[in-house]
Image (tube, rainbow, N blue to C red):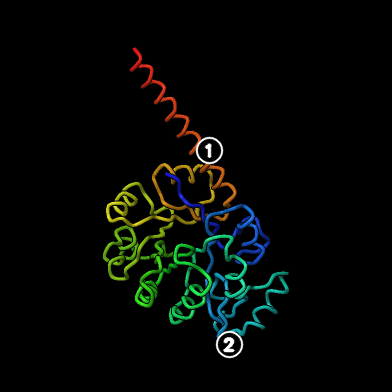
Amino acid sequence: MNPVIIAHRGASALAHHENTLEAFKIAIKLKTDYAEFDIRKTKDNQLIVFHDDEIRGSEISSLTYDKLCSITSKENYRVPLLSEVLELCKGKIKLDIELKESGYEKRVIDMVTKLYRYDEFMMKSFIDKTVKAIHDYDPYIKTGLLLGVKGASLKTRLHEYFPMTRIAACNADFVSPHYKLATPGFIKRMKLYNKPVYVWTVNRARLMGKCIYNNVDGIISDKPNVAIKVRQYILNRKLKQKMMKMRKQYAKEEI
């Protein structure tokens, strides 16, 4: 198994600020397979790359882009527009795009498909209707359902651990669960339904190794540099074990 490594909000642990052009440039330099990022919309209808729904007590949707930038400039960074990130990453790294809200799916799709082939990106959301809207507008896009809502009720958590009804309803092609949901049993069930599993957010080397041995399809990490090294270590180890097994087999045949 050779899972893809996905840089969470860019190489966020290695940059001064997550979801910035700096973070994506680092992910590109590391030759990470994908860069993951979040999309929101400002009051003046600008699509931006930003995770949180608020900043300094103000909702992002209530701020103009200029106002938002004036706030972040005091912390020595700038929130990039979606168009800037798309231009920067084009031809350099694949994209794992999360929509944090509903209502502008078509606009995002049009912007992305203008620059990227279908095999160069995937889109996902925690919001079932957003995943379905993406699929309905363009069924060629690889869509995913995020699982692991913070502070979820027992009922919601059960629907996340056994998500097939939700997956079928929103036509998701893959699932992206929090690593605590990605038990061996969960991963096996998803494999039976031919649904790839991209686990978030995995930052410890030992846990990365566990995920790889459990056959996940992708690891989303703030530390893609570590994930790349762990993947290569396990790949080399498995190759060495395979070579030793082959040598033993040849030795038996010679006898």
- Amino acid beneath label 1: Tyr
Is 48 on the left or on the right of 243, as rendered? right
Quadrant position of the C terminus in the picture: top left
Q: What number is the disc on residue 218? A: none
* Residue closer to the observer: 161 or 195: 195
The relative height of residue 165 versus residue 65 in the rendered view (above or below) is above
* Residue closer to the observer: 138 or 227: 138
The relative height of residue 132 versus residue 235 in the rendered view (above or below) is below
The relative height of residue 142 versus residue 32 in the rendered view (above or below) is below
Image-quadrant location for residue 145: bottom left
- Amino acid beneath label 2: Asp
- The residue at the far top in this view is 255
The relative height of residue 51 versus residue 185 in the rendered view (above or below) is below
Q: Residues within 10 Å of mark 1 (few under 14, many from 20)?
A: few
Q: Earlier in the sequence, mark 1 or mark 2?
A: 2
Q: Are marks 1 and 2 in contact (CB under 8 Å)?
A: no
The CA span between labels 1 and 2 is 48 Å
Question: Would you name the residue on which mark 1 appears?
Answer: 233
Residue 119 drawn at (x, y percent): 45, 62
Q: Label 1, secondary structure: give it.
A: helix
Residue 205 drawn at (x, y percent): 53, 44
Is 142 on the left or on the right of 37, as rendered? left
Q: Residues within 10 Å of mark 2 (few under 14, many from 20)?
A: few
Quadrant position of the N terminus in the picture: top left
* Residue closer to the observer: 244 or 225: 244
Residue 75 drawn at (x, y percent): 71, 70
- The residue at the far front in this view is 254
Question: Would you name the residue on which mark 2 appears?
Answer: 44
Is 178 on the left or on the right of 185, as rendered? right
Q: Nearer the viewer, mark 1 or mark 2?
A: 1
At 36% from the left and 49% from the top, the residue drawn is 183
